[in-house]
Image: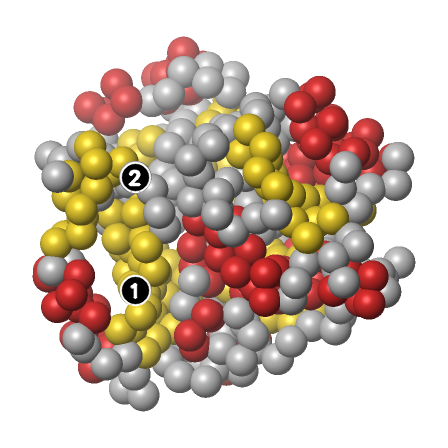
Amino acid sequence: MPINPDYFFNRQLKLGILGGGQLGKMLLHKANQWNLYTRALTQDIDAPLQLACSELHAGNLMDFTTVYNFGRACDVLTIEIEHVNTDALERLEAEGVVVHPRPAALKIINDKGLQKEFFRQHGIATAPFLFFESKDDILAAVRSGRLSLPFVQKTRKGGYDGRGVCIVNQWEDLDNVVDASSIVEKKISIAREIAVIAARNVQGEVMVYDPVGMEFNPEAHLLDLLVFPEKLNKELLDQTRSIAREIITGLDLCGLLAVELFLDQNENLWVNEVAPRPHNSGHQTIESCLTSQYEQHLRGILGLPLGPVDVVVPSVMINLLGWPGYSGKVTYMNLSEILKHPGVHVHIYGKNETRPFRKMGHVTIVHSDLEEAKKIAVWVKKTLKVISQ
């Protein structure tokens, strides 16, 4: 049931967040604007959201007792990272705590094998896949001819930001296969990678943002540059929105769902994977949309009407990654130079230590001309360096 807004805007409701990273920090900016009382559980007491919440607690997000005891003191509980103890969330939900995303849906999403089965059962296009329990099983399937190259291996649990993914293009790459329970997908001939974010509230209202185009760092497999909105013809645009609506409704999720998709050479859409929380592919909504993804997530989990998703101004977003060869206390070279440029919005996450390819912040460049925004983004990437002191 929706919650009376007077109850939580007067700080009587306690909103809990599992995770202490930059997504939680940006979510708390909106929560503080609305005067919400917030509690956060993080494994790192120096996490980026440390100064933004009403209460900060340190603990293991995978430990049943820690998550359960933390959640008991919350009225509404959400996540900014998927890797949490879902058994504890199920117990809390049964005892009356409002938990979003629903633990049952989170269990499906946390297991890439169950995710793929969900797509297949709902007729959602995804790359053909097989299940394997070990590296030896994969190698045996290759030798027998059951599995042919090229393919992509993904560990069923624990992977994120490129971790747990092995791309096998040639025989030499088989040495890099991970020894874990996995899915192996046929490698799709990708023309473009895109993402779309949907939002849903308990009343069943759904809003879908325009899709973004994504370019990835080939070395770190992390999002490097994002273009918003991505130019698609009407048919593909309608398909992305329909797919996002179908998945978020089928999983019975409230809050946000980010859907990552491949567009192949024949302009067919394939779902890669999903994330039930604010997402890297939605940072630009802070400056580019009437309602940011962070405000939308709060609206969804609190049962408020969803906000409009109209694009106010196009944008390009780049991640600020720690430069290769640098580890230690962070410094940002040429930050003052970047801030002189109109339309450039810098977000520093507050992580004290940098290391190669660690996400340390992002920059959103807004401009009425997307091509001009791309040029500025390239300049920012060359100019702003994240190194150690």
Pick whichever, 116 or 103, lies toward us: 103
Disc 1 marks which residue?
346
Figure check: 280 above or below 184? below
The disc, 1 or 2, on the residue closer to the chain's N-terminal end is 1
Identify the residue position indicated by label 2 in the image: 352
Depth check, front residue: 11 or 170:
11
At 51% from the left edge and 64% from the top edge, which residue is drawn? 196
Mark 2, Cα crowd under 10 Å, few <14 / some 14-19 / many 20+, is some
Between marks 1 and 2, how big is the CA–CA gap? 17 Å
Q: Residue 217: give x, y in percent of width and height.
A: 24, 49
Q: Nearer the viewer, residue 90 or 144?
A: 90
- Is residue 247 shown left or right of residue 344? right
User: On the picture, is 249 further left or further right than 231?
Assistant: right
Residue drawn at x 20%, y 23% as measured from the top left: 172
- Quadrant of the image for the C terminus? top left
Query: Is residue 47 in view from this perspective?
Result: yes
| Amino acid marked by disc 2 | Asn
Q: Is residue 195 something one can see in this rendering?
A: no
**Residue type, numbered disc 1:** Val
Residue 243 rendering spot, x and y as whole percentages: 61, 63
* Kind of element beneath mark 1: strand
Q: Indicate the position of residue 38 as horizontal and vertical percent values.
A: 65, 49
